[in-house]
Amino acid sequence: MSHGQPSPPLDPPQRSRLRRLLNRLEVDRAVFYAIATRAWQFLAGPISILVIAACFTPQLQGYFYTFASLMGMQTLVELGLHGVIINVASHEWSRLHLDANGHIQGDAAAIHRLAGLKRFVARWYAVVAVVFFLVCGIGGAIFLRLPSAEEPQSDNVAWMAPWFCLVALNALLLWAWAYTAILEGCNQVIVLHRVRLLQFVTGSFAVWASMIAGFGLWAAVVSVAVRLVWDLWLIAVRYRGFWQSLANQPVDKISWRDEIWPLQWKMAVFGVTLYLAFGLFNPVMFHYHTKAIAGQMGMTLTILTALESAAYAWVHIRTPLFGSLVARRDWVEMDRVFYRLTAISWSFYLLGAIGVCVGVWLLNVLPWDLTQRLASRLLPLLPTIILAVAYLILHLPRCQTIYVRAHKQDPFLLAAVMSHGLIAAAVIVLGRAYGPIGAAWGLFAVVSLVNLPWWTMIWIRTRRDWHSPASTA
């Protein structure tokens, strides 16, 4: 064949194989960026600890981590819509694609429905952003002004201005969720994960520079500002053609009652109870004990959460693989992959948790000024060990959830609501009475006596019922 002669067209089987190959490459690239993001968060953690210990007072550290906990109130006002948007948009995108100029092409009815979804969520999130600013801004300010039980006197930390700036920027970031959720549902995951990686890397350097420069609590504002700039670039520049394709289209109205609410209320209940379970550790220490203790709790939980998230990524990024194995009813391969990945991720966290506990012990016994200073910013060894073991136990139910949800079923709602409620109650009651050690024992008791046995029972039952020969037939 001469170089100038055009290649023959591909036959249908060849086109199908090429399409599968391209889809696999897209998934692999998205997985790479997701892993890189988790890896950066894990590696940047020790640097953040050193910078905070060097640049923040214990009281300022307490405000910093309590700010972060209160920002979780986004979940309370957003009501689980983000995940529903991804699901609804993905159904419409199955008949659509982007052309070389970034404009949407494909089935006209799907474009009209996607335009209707965009209009609905833009209005919803505009209202949610305003509600968040008012509720979180005013409510958080009232909470932060309350005297602590063990610190009745003012600490003279200038927190008011950075607090309201932080809430305002997070409100704008919440509004941007409407658009990034649609993009994710429309399978723009490679670009989204790449931007997320850039957000975390640039945000980390910006925060470290702000702390070193003496910006104090304004460093939290800088962090959110960096994330917001990247999201606005993504929406207004990178995908400008995408939104232009929807701007002048007839709108096929989306029925919130029929298409969104049946799934949204479940995700809303799950998200709200999850925040109450794991978002109260720092505020409870901040209010009932001291700001320094809140800072210790925040830094310790940040380390353990980053470690567990990095380990969890081994299983989570294979979610599409589990879905495809369920579609093929290849139960043997699904079990093999699940057991192997769960063992790897669990072992990774176990080794990391041992390293964290050994590190805390060394910081407390070594006589150097730097080690003593770092030790004072973390919880003592015993509550650290208890929290680390609690997260180790919790890791298995999280992996089991991915396995079960791959079957397009979610039987965990009641278990999640009950366990989250018990964790929240234990943190408030025991944390108020006994401080970090009480909150740690409360979390350990619930995850070992409720989460692990309940999730395992559901996993065994669903696996037996759904993988039985009668079900397969």
Image (tube, rainbow, N blue to C red):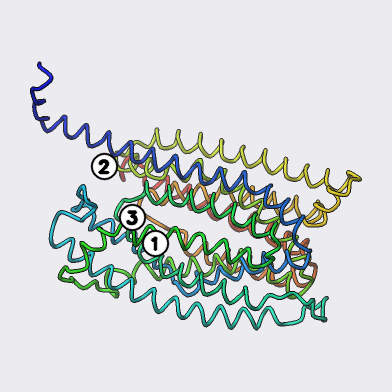
- Residue 45 at what x, y percent from top left? 65, 49
- Residue 419 at what x, y percent from top left? 58, 63
Would residue 354 be found to the left or right of residue 67 on screen? Answer: right
On residue 341, the disc is none
Element type where label 3 sits in the image:
helix
Looking at marks 2 and 3 on the same chain, the residue that comes earlier in the sequence is marked by 3
Give 389 or 83, whichever is nearer the viewer. Answer: 83
Element type where label 2 sits in the image:
loop
Looking at marks 2 and 1 on the same chain, the residue that comes earlier in the sequence is marked by 1
Would residue 209 be found to the left or right of residue 244 on screen? Answer: right
Please name the residue shown 49% across and 60% down the image: 227
Q: Which quadrant does the C terminus fall into?
A: top left
Label 3: how many Cα within 10 Å (few below 14, some 14–19, many 20+): few
Q: Is residue 133 above or below residue 42?
A: below
The quadrant in which residue 109 appears is: bottom left
Label 2: how many Cα within 10 Å (few below 14, some 14–19, many 20+): few
Question: Residue beneath label 1, please?
Answer: 83
The residue sitting at the top extreme is 1
Give 257 or 120, whichever is nearer the viewer. Answer: 120
Looking at marks 3 and 1 on the same chain, the residue that comes earlier in the sequence is marked by 1
Please name the residue shown 78% across and 61% down the image: 437
Question: Residue beneath label 3, please?
Answer: 238
Q: How many marks?
A: 3
Mark 3 residue type: Arg
Spatial distance from mark 3 to mark 1, Cα to Cα? 22 Å
Give 18 or 47, whichever is nearer the viewer. Answer: 47
The residue sitting at the front extreme is 213
Would residue 66 be found to the left or right of residue 198 on screen? Answer: right
Spatial distance from mark 2 to mark 1, Cα to Cα? 32 Å
Question: Residue beneath label 2, please?
Answer: 473
